[in-house]
Image (spheres, rainbow, N blue to C red):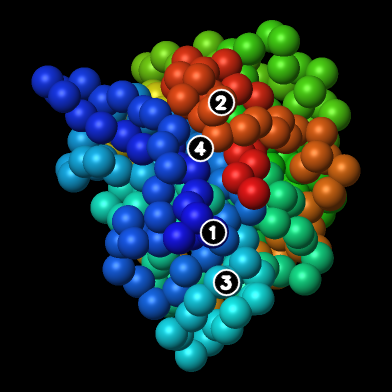
Amino acid sequence: MAENRFSALVLTEADGKVAGAIRDLTDADLPDGDVTVRVAYSGVNYKDGLILNGLGRLVRNYPHVPGIDFAGTVEESHHARYREGDKVVLTGWRVGEAHWGGLAGKARVSGDWLVPLPKRLDARQAMAVGTAGFTSMLCVLALEDHGVTPGSGKVIVTGAAGGVGSVAIAILAKLGYEIAAVTGRADTHDYLKSLGAAEIVGREALSEPSGKPMESAVWAGAVDTVGGATLARLIGQMAYGAPIAACGNAGGIKVETNVLPFILRGVKLLGVDSVMQPYEDRLRAWERVGHDLSMDKLEAMTEEIGLDGAMEAAGRILKGQVRGRTVVKLS
């Protein structure tokens, strides 16, 4: 029926190359799941950039609808937690990778993967937060759970101009932290300061090994979105007992370090995963987002595009040309 038709970004693969095109689909095309959602907004995250460009072998089966997060309204539900008309958010659970995702007018998923839309957020704001901002909040919670407070000292955020870094800075600033933002992009300094960064650290200051097993203790906590050599340098610069919330690998997956910062300073390396977080932890993080993120700052870091702009945005995010968050309007 005509009313069941909706637009979707569909990826196809031929000769090892991935291409995307907007197509009309129907409810019958959707995969199995016990909740069907009319999608209002999705987003473009770094992982979306990889998927839409056919990198990392994250998608194995084509044709495929990408989009690792979305927010919208329940249209049909066979899940005990949700009913028609409920506002919901989805991030993670390999949606957009192994399961069709949110860059479409509708999505059908397991209700276990959804969370209720926080009362303080609308669908657009939820996707301005999106997977990146949800990950940022998990990182902040990890630091707090390991004793970091605004009075502990400086907190450093790497990859600061990206989605995770931008939201992390805005959250930490509202909570009263003194923040150092690491970036290699001179054109983002004013932007990062507007989010609440007190200090800008050039990417080059952390991109090369120091040659020392430990350096001067500087940072009371860290949110690292980069990995690689940057994370290795941070480990040697952390204060006694200080934690690093590590959530990304844009700078590489190998970290060459030594045990001294861990056994002499008690440095804590905390892995933060946003994909498989349990339901109760998701509720906690989303509730805190509603309290601890300035909506004005969120809006200032957010660009809105249509579905026809998703492929281009995916290319820009891999080149480090995207500042903050990009939301995709579907409805």
**SS label for mark 4:** loop
Q: Which residue is mark 3?
A: 74
Is residue 310 toward the left or the right of residue 154 in the image? left
Is residue 218 toward the left or the right of residue 135 in the image? right
Image height of 58 relative to 313, above or below: below
Q: Which residue is mark 1?
A: 3
**SS label for mark 2:** helix
Q: Which residue is mark 4?
A: 45
Mark toward the start of the polypeptide (1 vs 4): 1
Q: Residue flagged by tag 3: what amino acid is it?
A: Val
Q: Residue flagged by tag 1: what amino acid is it?
A: Glu
Q: Nearer the viewer, residue 227 or 264?
A: 227
What is the quadrant of the N terminus in the image? bottom left
- Which residue does the image show at 87% across and 43% down from the upper left? 296
Image height of 178 relative to 80, above or below: above
Q: Are marks 1 and 2 in contact (CB under 8 Å)?
A: no
Determine the CA span between mark 1 and mark 2.
24 Å
Q: Which residue is mark 2?
A: 309
Mark toward the start of the polypeptide (2 vs 3): 3
Q: Residue flagged by tag 2: what amino acid is it?
A: Gly
Is residue 73 toward the left or the right of residue 265 in the image? right
Q: Nearer the viewer, residue 42 or 213?
A: 42
- Residue 306 location in percent, x, y? 62, 33
